Amino acid sequence: MNRQGPARSVLIFSAFALAFFMSYGLRAVNAVLAPDLTAAFSLSAGDLGAMSSAYFVAFSAMQLPLGIWLDRYGSRRVEAALLLVAAAGACFFALGSNITQLWIGRALIGAGMAACLMAALKAFRFWFEARLQQRLAAWILVCGTSGALVSTVPVSLLSQAYGWRMCFAIAAGLLLLCSAFLWFGLPRDEEQAASRHAAGPVTDGQAVQGYGEVFASRFLRGAMPSLVLFQGGFLALQTLWAGPWMTQVLKLDAPDAAHALMLFNAALLTGFLVLGWAAPRLAARAWDGPRVMRLAAALTLLTEAAMIYLLEPWAWALWLVLAVISTVFTLLQTEVALSFPARLSGRAYTGSNLLLFGGVFLLQWGFGAVIDASQRLGASTVEAFQCALVLLMLLQLLSLLPLRSQGAEA
């Protein structure tokens, strides 16, 4: 860990924050563009879920090699290179003429974005003091949520004026700029430290073995089911199904739905800002990740039950409540990653991320599959969405059973 001056601290944080801004924006953009994509390619709910979740398939597949690369080569080099892959994916998506090409483009975007948060958290662990880690994690999530905010009304207006393809063409150019900022703007001392560590006799087998140590952790194995079902479930809704819920369940028109989604992401951003202030205070009062998680889980289940029951147009406001509550889940994710030694930090972050985003893929695709199956059995569109959310709630409730505090697993 190196102490940074203010200017250097801002430079380091900004480079990673801008990349994560793009990552979160592209992750969530299909929630707004879903009607355009559905109309252009005649997609069913299952098709839409499968295509959008390609991001998470590729994102998850990258996590194991990514952890090794981050530990060996440093955050700057790895993330700058992968952002070029994301830029290529955005171009491919913009030019796509069928669902297969869209799937490939979306997968390339996911693969290229795989390092955005994990590289930032690993870099922060190297460059900043331990007492700042929870706060920095919350702040970079604020920046990411700003990307989701921009992916609502601004993207909707851009799509109406120039078409959805232009949105992805512009994104490709911005990703190239982010890559250049990381490559040319950041200091090299983190990757130099990584190179010195890798200069020893570390084989690929030993590097992979580090993942064995990560996945053997009883704390991680107890925490991941609830993280996957609650945090991952929220991401699956936020990045795709929130939009169709607004239009098909609450019957909002497209502009109103875009505004509701903008407020939804604004609430998420506000929640992360508050979390950045509250995180050290919760830790000082011995509120560990599992304890906070249980409280947030109870509030989440109550909010989701209200969403199922209340179907008036004004019920979009319940999504704001869900967004604020969901920010708390990141405390447990960060606590899980920080429970491992620094030599495993890259693999700890990416190993847990593999499980989390693999779950997001299954949940996002599965939500659409349940909607399609329910409709085939005679359910209305509204009833089909309700069935999908009820099933998610049941899985979330079961996921809390293995959750234990870190000390209880020792």
Image (cartoon, rainbow, N blue to C red):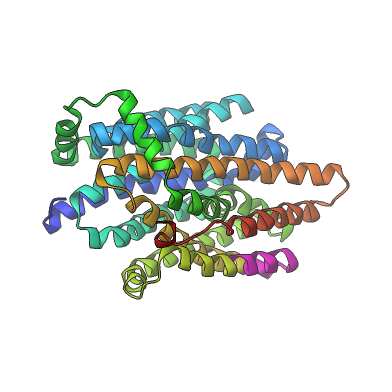
Is residue 164 rendered to the left or right of residue 68? right
Q: Image height check: is 123 above or below 275?
A: above
Instruction: Look at the image and give the residue range highlighted in magenta.
Output: 300-317
- The quarter of the picture where residue 77 lies is top left
Question: Which residue is found at the position 55% from the left and 48% from the top?
Answer: 239
Is residue 34 rendered to the left or right of residue 66? right
The foreground one among 216 and 97 is 216
Expressed as whole percent of the image width and height from the top left, the position of residue 264 reads: 53, 62
Expressed as whole percent of the image width and height from the top left, the position of residue 391 reads: 71, 53
The foreground one among 310 and 391 is 391
Q: Tell me, yes or no, whether the highlighted magenta stretch contains residue 12.
A: no
Q: In which quarter of the image is the C terminus?
A: bottom left
- Farthest residue toward the front? 410
Question: How many tags in the picture?
Answer: 0
Expressed as whole percent of the image width and height from the top left, the position of residue 297 reads: 56, 65
Expressed as whole percent of the image width and height from the top left, the position of residue 271 reads: 44, 66
Q: Is residue 10 visible?
A: yes
- The quarter of the picture where residue 301 lies is bottom right
- Farthest residue toward the bottom? 285
Q: Can residue 266 be seen in this view?
A: no
The foreground one among 166 and 322 is 322
Q: Tell me, yes or no, whether the highlighted magenta stretch contains residue 304.
A: yes
- Secondary structure that dominates the magenta span: helix
Question: Which residue is found at the position 79% from the left and 42% from the top?
Answer: 373
Question: Which residue is found at the position 58% from the left and 38% from the top?
Answer: 52
Is residue 330 rendered to the left or right of residue 73? right
Q: Image height check: is 354 above or below 95?
A: below
The foreground one among 59 and 130 is 130
Is residue 288 rendered to the left or right of residue 403? left
